[in-house]
Amino acid sequence: MRKTSITGWLLASPLSLILLVFLAAPIAMIVVVSFWGATEWAIYPAFEFENYEFLLTSSVTSRVFLNTFKYAAITWACTLVIGFTVAYYLAFHIRTLTWQIVLFLLCTIPFLTSNIIRMISWIPFLGRNGLANSALISWGVIDEPVEWLLFSDFSVILAFVHLYTLFMVVPIFNTMMRIDKSLIEAAADAGASGWQTLWQVIVPLTKPGIMIGTIFVLALVMGDFITVRFMSGSQSANVGRMIQNDIALLQYPSASATAVILLVTVLLLIGTLLRFVDIRKEL
Amino acid sequence: MTTISKIRYSRRSMLKAGGAAVAAAALPAPMVWGQETKNITLRQFGTGVSNLNEVAMKVKEDLGFTLEMTALDSDSVTQRAATQPDSFDIADIEYWICKKVWPTGNLQAMDTSKIANYDKIVGTFRSGKLTPESVIAQGTAPHTVGFTSGQNGKDFVQEESGWMTLIPTIYNADTLGIRPDLIGRPINNWSELLNPEFKGKASILDISSIGIMDMAMVVESMGEYKYPDKGNMTKEEIDLTLGIFTEAKKAGQFRAFWKSFDESVNLMASGEVVIQSMWSPAITAVRSQGIPCVYQPLEEGYRSWGGGIGLSASLSGMELDAAYEYINWYLSGWVGGFLMRQGYYSAVPETSKNFMSEDEWGFWFEGKPAQGDIANPFGKVMEKAGAVRDGGSFYDRMGAVACWNAVMDENQYMVRKWNEFIAA
């Protein structure tokens, strides 16, 4: 008895240690620093609420958080629709496993380059004199270049969707592959139409995958700063950029406070989502 | 080439030099000394403008020791100078950064009597006056943060005290860059940046400490307000300045903001933007793509910046001597010529003259028409014969400086307001 319990502890300890050192400790440090004070060139230990007070009372914070939610919500909706469709096609319309694997790998090819490059390559494409505008003009769709294609919320969300759809495809595809095909046959035998099968059988059974994809996309979009900076031409702000600005100006305590609030918000959001779906079924 | 006069050993050099150091300690002969210098490594960091590998290679060739260069953006430079004093030996920073970093005590003052060309350094960095008649511009003028009271001083003094905080190395006068082909009319004032004619085609840089100065130039040029000191605004002045720009931003005046050099080049070259705050080498980069771009001199004058090298407080012994040797070498002309052929100015222009052709000197410094093709130090042709430098001669350009890059007393307030402007 005693021996197995020691073995158990030993087996669990590497992971706990790694989590403790690389996850719990840094977060604890961020929380501690968020109460510190800062001068222009240094930070000093203190226990003050000035950082939070400024954050929670400034109108910029609420605007920036709203903007962050807006990006997250729209990106989530777009990636969900595209991701679900792609996964559905792969799982139910492609018959052989070989082709499923081939097509799935095809989806991942763009991810062989860095995401900065995938993002920046949109800029010449969407620009005033870019490919999109010149094509539209030569087709006679528009007379003058469309300005909102680049350095706008549109371009930010486009880049997000492009960057993160795969994170939705993978978990959804994974759950769909585990759906027992006999359930679909049973639905068909019972006289369900294609839509009914989709809505009443496949979607409910895919929920854990959708939820995992959602967590990925939300966490990535809410924590992003570089996509927003490049694709909005620095004209829009989200929480990540706010933190980045603070760090650049040596305001670590203020950056930590913003990070803590962002962390709490994201955790609350994910906590709420998990109330609806039990992703443990998936694991 | 001068040699280091005294032989002293710091712990670090002893460890690095290993056997050679032991030999040198036993036999302090000049012969061994050369070997010793080779084992010195100085770590320099700074902004990309002057952290060039060519300089490090030339140092190795001329002085024998190794210079390790790290190029960072100005925010990171400030951060590193202020928070990691042991991570560098030489800091290549701007004067406004010096104002922030000097009080931390991470840098040590330099004895001007050890600087051979000190008397030849242009007046801007000593008395503040380029020529005896010059008016000192607003902002963090280099001479106001260029001297301290003594070797261990943490303050700034306003006279030439013999102890310099930074040795000036590189500086220039900045203005707006324009695309003459897309604008098609003369531009003479800073206020044009907010002219509705350029709606959706203007840009400004998103580096608060520099951007706010460009904004102040614009506001003053529009006749909205006359600042007692653009480099040190009150809270009300900051609100007013950013208020005007927030309004313009909401009206769609700006296409984008830029933070890095390449972004400004791309915005201009692609035609997304036709008028924007810009840096001199960015103009050159656009032009070298065959796209017309002018560094437009404006009636209100230039916004200027200057950089210098400072020594880490932890530098001592042989490394310190090497650092002085490096500084003296820096001011002796080769680097100056190298930088001036890219459009910057050197702190001791007359020594740089020896390292430039007469035509190059005439074009870059005297504002004369180029006689033949003007190439940059990397051999790329920048200007054809007959071209004249935008803004003219050194004295025309540096004599028309209206303000220096600055850091304000209300800096933290300004930064918060700047963030609001970006989020607006």
Image: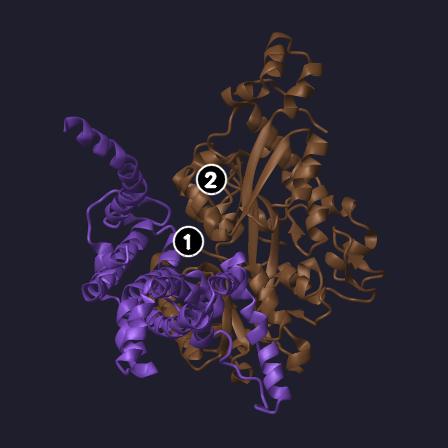
User: Measured from the top left, where is residue A38 in percent x and y?
Assistant: 30, 49
- The residue beneath circle 1 is A248
Report whether B34 appears left or right of A64.
Answer: right
Q: Which chain is disc 1 placed on?
A: A
Q: Residue furthest front?
A: A189
User: Measured from the top left, where is residue A272 in percent x and y?
Assistant: 20, 64
Vertical order, A190 against B111 (above or below): below
Q: Secondary structure at mark 1?
A: helix
Position of the N terminus of chain A by quadrant:
top left
Classify residue A220 by image quadrant: bottom left
- The residue beneath circle 2 is B148
The chain coloured purple is A
Q: Does any portion of residue B228 appear in the rendered image?
A: no
The chain coloured brown is B
Q: Amino acid at mark 1?
A: Ala
Task: Give neighbour class at mark 2: few <14, some 14-19, many 20+ (Cα, 10 Å).
Answer: many
Q: Is A194 or B47 nearer to us in this picture? A: A194
- The answer to whether marks 1 and 2 mark residues whose Cβ atoms lie closer than 8 Å is no
Tell which tag, 1 or 2, sits nearer the viewer.
Answer: 1
Query: In the image, what residue occupies the spot 57% across and 32% down?
Result: B42
Q: Is A204 or B276 nearer to us in this picture? A: A204
